[in-house]
Amino acid sequence: MARVALVNLASLPMPGNEPIFPIGVRCVQDALDLAGHETRLIDFVQSPGAVDDLAWAAESWDAIGFTIRNIDPIDLSCDGHVEHYVRFMNRVRATLDEAGGQRPLLVGGGPGYTLFADQLRGLLGFDVGVIGPGEQAMLDILAAPEEYRGLAKNITGRRYKGFLTEVLRHPEALMKVYTRFEGAMIGVETRRKTCYQGCVYCPYAYLNGDNSGDLKPLELIADELRAIHAAGIRRVFFTDGIFNSELRFAKQVVQLITELSLPGLTWSAYFTPKPFDDEFAALLAESGVEFVVISPDSLDDRVMKLLGKTFDTRHVDRCLERCRKHGIPARVNVVFGGPGEDDTSVRNSIKYINSKLHDGELVMHVGYRVLPQTGMARQLGISDEGLLAPTFYPFHPDTFSWIIRDLENRFMPPSVLFNFMAARSASKRMAKVPLPGDSLNSAPTEFPYLALSRELPLA
Ligand code: B12
Ligand code: SF4
């Protein structure tokens, strides 16, 4: 049996990073523990001293796994995290060199890692990286570690049967550490591979890999929720790409939450406005849902279509009506600056917002972060390597003015206005990246054919 350290790089102190409970690497750790391996999670929120003092790295590990959740905060005004990961990994490798002896196998994984696996593996010096789900892949690696030493490749994760049979039991001490944060929230999975749609900017189908669409048995979800509640966490976010894409199962989960009746527990998730029937809304209302988050991303039917949405504003109308009827708070995500966005589409979206959204319901951003393995990346023809520094889909520089011109002030409280202005000035400072000639015809934008990109200071 192997001795394995698992390091939550997402908990490193980095500008723009607000660590959340590391459920991804916890899934991997539980799978290893169940198989009899000896593991330790190094989390820098729980052990802040472990950032500077790398003594943990020099212990006698057979393998050290590193989880990378975020590449950057996907915000025009924020820098990326990659340079921090590179600097940290350089220090870890130097510590291992100093310690001498057989070096542990270095393994990378996590959703952010998966997106840029080919670029990050080399930059961070991992022997092997895992694309997608990590439990079974890590078990495979530990079963034959010498096959992976110095492999310098990524492997694709595969289905983990324990998802259907084992309760995920997070250590209470770790949960308690994360309850310190205001509004502490923990992620819970109900299904694997949860969206089969193809929005042009979205990498979720790629990230979740092939998990056969497994549904977690309700009794396992119940046990997980009870333990989370007992540890003092009162907010849950179901991490499924789309919580209600299989409505029948979503209804069972919601009913379960109501039946569990855990005092003060509230929850949320990403929802799609279709399917979303009246019975579902009634169940949600009873269950203590905090809010229903939907992501039409535009409220102009032409742009929604170009984004690859399989619903239109009529479905958004009906979903909001059902939420209102049952008194369920809603959040509507809108990201301006997508394919085909122009003065008219911004005007249409804002007309919808002003006339149909209540105060506090709009969550607004400007600029689409272009990620690998998406239709948007293919349209623009930028290589994955070129996307590692925060890169945004080309949008018209007047987009900010169009929004300010039409949007009612009630949707622009000071905090939103501040972020908006920061994004605007950041967009002016960003490098304009020329797109490859042959991508120009396929990109359905009418505007300057230049993506916006921040530099990646890796030197
Ligand atoms: C749910 C979710 C959220 C929820 C999280 C709720 C919660 N309390 O956990 C909310 C809405 C709060 C959220 C916020 C944000 N998110 Co988010 N989120 C997701 C989502 C949909 C699922 C993540 C998840 O928990 N999955 C379930 C767990 C079990 O899976 P997992 O983490 O992938 O872990 C598996 C594998 O990756 C692997 N693995 C993990 N670690 C390791 C380690 C090793 C060694 C190995 C071998 C394998 C391995 O095995 C695990 C089990 O199979 C993903 C997209 C997606 N479909 O993956 C985006 C995603 C992770 N989020 C992303 C981002 C950017 C953010 C925000 C920065 C957005 C923002 N600007 O606010 C914030 C940051 C939050 C934070 N502080 O870290 C990006 C990250 C990549 C990137 N672009 O940088 C993603 C990929 C979406 C995207 N747009 O690309 N998010
Ligand atoms: S944005 Fe949502 S609906 Fe679209 S592909 Fe991604 S998870 Fe699915």
Image: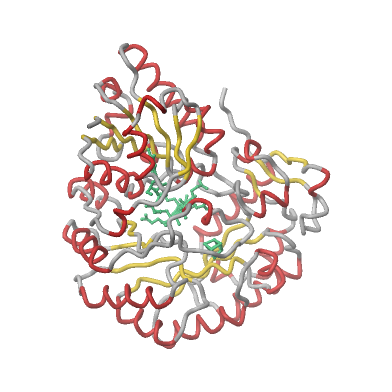
Residue 266 percent location from the top left of the image: 29, 69
- The relative height of residue 151 versus residue 450 in the rendered view (above or below) is above
Residue 347 falls in which quadrant of the image? Answer: bottom right
Residue name at image x 75 percent, y 55 percent: 396
Residue 141 percent location from the top left of the image: 36, 34
Colour style of the rendered protein structure = secondary structure
Residue name at image x 25 percent, y 50 percent: 180
Residue name at image x 47 percent, y 38 percent: 155
Instruction: Say which of 26 and 366 sits in front.
Output: 26
Instruction: Say which of 255 and 104 sits in front.
Output: 104
- The relative height of residue 44 versus residue 422 in the rendered view (above or below) is above
Q: Is residue 80 left or right of residue 37?
A: right
Residue 10 falls in which quadrant of the image? Answer: top left
Instruction: Say which of 35 and 447 sits in front.
Output: 35
Image quadrant for the N terminus? top left
Residue 119 percent location from the top left of the image: 56, 33
- The relative height of residue 454 versus residue 418 in the rendered view (above or below) is above
Instruction: Say which of 81 and 64 sits in front.
Output: 64
Image quadrant for the C terminus? top right
Residue name at image x 83 percent, y 54 percent: 441
